[in-house]
Image (cartoon, grey):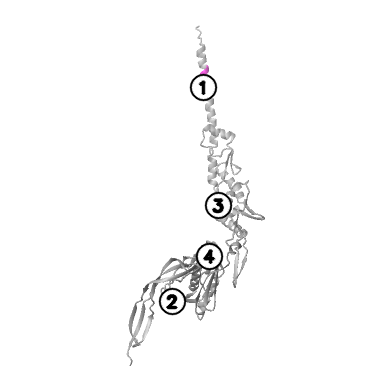
Amino acid sequence: MVKKVRNKKSTAIIVGSVLTAAIVCGGVGYVLAVQNNVSKWANKIYPGIAVEGIDLSGMNETEAKTILKSNVENNVNKKVVTATKDSKSYELKYSEINPKFNIEDTVKTALNEGKSKGLFEKNGIIKSGINKKISLEFSYDESALKKFEQKISSELNVKAKDASLVITGGNMSITSEATGIEVDKDKLHKLLKESISSDLSKQSKIDIPMNVIQPKATKAALSKIDGIISSFSTTYNPAQTDRSENLAIAAKKVNGTVVMPGETFSYNDTVGERTTEAGFKNGAIFKDNKVVQDVGGGVCQVSTTLYRAVMSAGIKSVERHNHSLKASYSDLGLDATVYWGSLDYKFKNTYNFPIYLEGYTTSNQVVFNVYGSKAGKGSNNYDIVAETIKTLEPDVQTINDPSIDAGQVVWDTQPVTGYVVKSYRVTTDASGNQIAKEFIATDTYSKVNGVKRVGTKKAK
């Protein structure tokens, strides 16, 4: 019998192969187990992932949406933002801003968290968790914030009070000013937006930001006014009662106006729209080169008188217009017409002291006095003059009319001469010597062509 003997080397190879096979088989089994475990979580949210404090571990998409809707959305609607100022408190409920939650995308974000990693990393996350916190984003109606801010402002705002000046018979009385406070709406809006969140553990409380508002006119500033620095007046026909009433109303509305240094005065803004509700009556105005009746007719005489008084104080116009035709109460080039919505008279106070406008009517005059600082104005005097540089002669059309007795003339349209004039501001010193002549404007007053009918009817 022949006995076979294996050498040690052959035995070692066989043993090693067996062990390798065992290890390989075991490894494949492990991988398969990992794959199986990870696949079970393919449609589930990994452990350790929470949205606004709600643990979504192991939930599928539907489950996560349901729990977020019931636990977060409903509870967020119960939250409030509290805004306080001293002893006053205001609450804005989240339900008032109509929040719209992005649950769909938030759940998808949670579901996809960690899913892009490698097989063994995924398995590690499944075993130990990922500790990931996700915020639930939501949108809301910002107009609701604006309403909330407006409510706060309406209750907390206190307007600044200007110092006031009253002049009666040349006697001046000044009432002191008072500062005001108002909500800083921009800062409040920013604070509110920053405080709104879906974090259920966070209750928002903010301090309402306020600004101190300084008055425009102070007693110290008004105290610089010490007397009349210019005056001007025009006459009117008191028999025209409706027009006279319009003059009185307009002058009264301007009377008592204080124009601070650097401030621009607007006649239209001060007098307001000329309506019957405001007390204005019909009066004559120029329209389309014709004289027609309109509510507020005559107020241009008030603006013209004011213009002359202010120019005499050394204050130039920002906006000023001449009439289309010559006005009976003013020389050419020295008037200032106004019309609501289109033509205004404006001037800017270029002095470093305020001025006070005193306007009133007498039995037949419109009067304006401009008060200010006599020393601040200086000793110079100011006047405005105009020079006619062209005369526009109207044409006259003659029509023979057999219905009118021969020799008689009837004017259908009276001719009106037009003019082109240049106006200047003349400055003189205390001795009356001219020291400056400044161009103001070139004004054109339209001509109106006449139409007359001449009678040709023969006597019987």
**Rendered image: mark on residue 140:** 3
**Rendered image: mark on residue 448:** none
Tell which circle, 4 or 1, labels the residue nearer the N-terminal end.
1
Task: Specify whether residue 257 is in view.
Answer: yes
Prevalent SS, magenta region:
helix
Q: Is there CB contact under 8 Å for labels 4 and 3?
A: no
**Rendered image: mark on residue 291:** 2
Amino acid type, residue under disc 1 in the picture? Ala
Asked if residue 124 is positioned above or below residue 274 in the image, the reply reads above
Tell which circle, 3 or 2, labels the residue nearer the N-terminal end.
3
* Left or right relative to 403: residue 193: right
Closer to us: mark 3 or mark 2?
2
Under circle 4, the secondary element is: helix
Residue nearest the viewer, comparing 97 with 252 = 252
Closer to us: mark 2 or mark 1?
2
Distance from the alpha carbon under mark 3 to that under mark 1? 64 Å
Residue nearest the viewer, comparing 221 with 443 = 221
> Over which residues does the magenta segment extend?
15-19
Tell which circle, 4 or 2, labels the residue nearer the N-terminal end.
2
Under circle 2, the secondary element is: strand
- Mark 1, residue position: 21
**Rendered image: mark on residue 377:** 4
Q: Residue at x 52, y 14 (%)?
A: 11
On the image, the x and y values in percent for residue 295 come to: 49, 74
Rendered image quadrant of residue 257:
bottom right
On the image, the x and y values in percent for residue 456 come to: 32, 87
Amino acid type, residue under disc 3 in the picture? Tyr
Amino acid type, residue under disc 2 in the picture? Val
Q: Is there CB contact under 8 Å for labels 4 and 1?
A: no
Asked if residue 336 is positioned above or below residue 100 in the image, the reply reads below
Tell which circle, 2 or 1, labels the residue nearer the N-terminal end.
1
On the image, the x and y values in percent for residue 151 come to: 60, 58
